Amino acid sequence: MIQYAEAKDPKPLHPDLWQGLGNELMLSFADNNQRYAKNNPPVISQLSNEWKAVAWKGEKVHTRFLLWSAQERKNIHINTTALTDGKGHTIPASAITSGFVRYVLTDGLNKEGTGCGIPSRNEMDSSLAEDVIDFVPSTGMAANTTLPVWLSVRVPRDASPGVYTGKLEVVTDGRKQLLNCQVQVKDHVLPSPQEWQFHLDLWQNPYSIARVYKVKPWSKEHFNALKPYIQMLADAGQKAITVSMVYDPWRGQTQDIYGAMIQWTKKKDGSWHYDFSIFDQWVNFMMSYKIDKIINCYSMIPWNNRFYYHDEALGKDTVVEAKPGTEGYTAHWKPMLTAFAQHLKQKGWFGKTSIAMDERALEDMQQTIKLVKSVDPEFKLSLAGNYHTEIEKDIYDYCVPSAQQFDAEIMKKRLAAGYPTTYYTCCAEGYPNTFTFSPTAEATWLGWYAAAKNFSGYLRWAYNCWNEEPLVDSRFRSWSAGDTYLVYPGPRSSIRFERLVEGIQDYEKIRLLKADFSKNNSAQLAQLQQLLDGFDINALKETPAATMLVKAKEMMNQW
């Protein structure tokens, strides 16, 4: 476990707000959609020691409770016990986990209301945001602070329907305080994450993990460090493998530049040799976690049109700059695509592999598509970028910005053909988003929006493009805080990541309910569709994501 100390709160402490608490350790369940400051006592209208949840079999549900004290606490740990239904059935204690929530430095949006082009940090109103979920056995807390605790219950897929209750012990300095938990298990089953149809595409950066763990890329130690992060990703239903087939496809926009997973060598006789060994190791590793629907290979159109390779005649690494459609571009890429197609077919991966680009101009895309198809018409292509009707038929995996829409008929045809048709958010959207200062409900809202607009899933760069001190300061260069990663070194999850998975589970539940209602309950199908119709980005201008979700979940829990 990578240890660290949280950042100091840049906001002033107000000791007067803590007067009157004495030696008492306060605790209460809290609104899961609300953010709570670290150095202020939480404002809770009515303290509660009871949490009630409704879940499907196989679903993971969560909440948060708060501890706050005017006195320092040195040893806090949480004891979980099994939940029982009084009929001999249990949800075991092993299915219940708790984690202490840590705070990171965050910022906000720019004056235009987006997360791009953020001013220098000394011009921003920095603050702390609760986000990191630290799964450690115990912790302490300083005087005059609030400590959130994340609580999750993973309902077994074979659980009997019913109401399960139990208690949670909060132990500090030998004193126990109890919280009551109740989970109503419905007679519906959520499939395992590998069976979810939601097309989740969170871009991985294995080079960040190598840097943080101080290991050589692609060594045994590197793969060992990668394991828990890829397991977390698999448990979220991830479908795509992120491959950098060239060096630095995104023009150094991350702390850790993506290396080339395919080694390019120009021989002295002018021919080319391609070493696919790292690519093979990475793909095999990801597939061992059942992340195997698509291998997205970036990028034939890097952001600077620069391509790096080793030149034997020169005896050194070198670079060529070429624009799609030019002779130099074709001469550089055609031999590689020919060799790559042959290699993929030998490995049995050709049908799963897609040549992927992001946010590239239409003309460049057209030239690149033409070249790829000239090598092998069966090559798949992916694009995360603006919607262009001119190339839609050529794109297998098409992901558009959240504010854009596919034509309804085209969407219908794509989904019927099994083409991933998704949307993404990035720094360009002030909301909905997954910045560390975004309302946490927006991460869950993303899954509902996908269901409402018939998208097959969601893409986000990036899963783990960590900055220099990701556990302390979530800000990075000119993007809003948290834009570049959703999980933390440790491994540690985050409120944002957990709530994103919550929305994916909801998407799957909606999909299954729709299928059920379509067979025998047209009235409930109409109710569900009416509920989904409210999930529109423009509606967020007037109605917070949390308000929409509370209403929608109350309705869904009745079915």
Image (cartoon, rainbow, N blue to C red):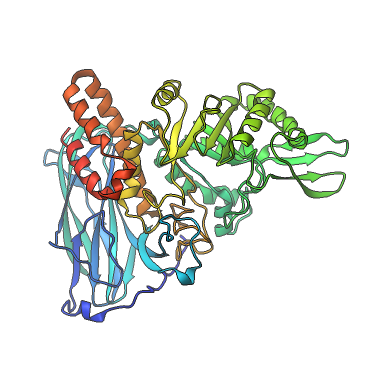
Q: Position of residue 263 (x, y in %)?
A: 71, 42
* Left or right of 314 on screen, residue 255: left
Q: Nearer the viewer, residue 197 or 158?
A: 197
Asked if one can make out residue 278 in the rendered structure from this viewpoint, the answer is yes
Most extreme residue toward the front is: 112
Which residue is painted at 46% across and 30% down in the image?
420
> Which quarter of the picture shows residue 109?
bottom left
Percent coordinates x, y for residue 93 in the rendering:
26, 48
Position above or below: 344 against 547: above
Q: Is residue 474 left or right of residue 320?
A: left
- Residue 186 lies, with reference to residue 393, above or below; the image says below
Task: Tell me if residue 421 comes above or below residue 123 in the rendering.
Answer: above
Name the residue: 26% across, 60% down. 78
The C terminus, quarter of image: top left
* Residue 54 visible somewhere in the drawing: no
Residue drawn 39% across and 51% down?
Answer: 434
Horizontally, residue 208 falls left or right of residue 322, namely left
In the rendered image, the vertical position of residue 48 relative to residue 262, given as above or below? below
Relative to the observer, which residue lies in front, 430 or 44? 430
Residue name at image x 31 percent, y 69 percent: 38
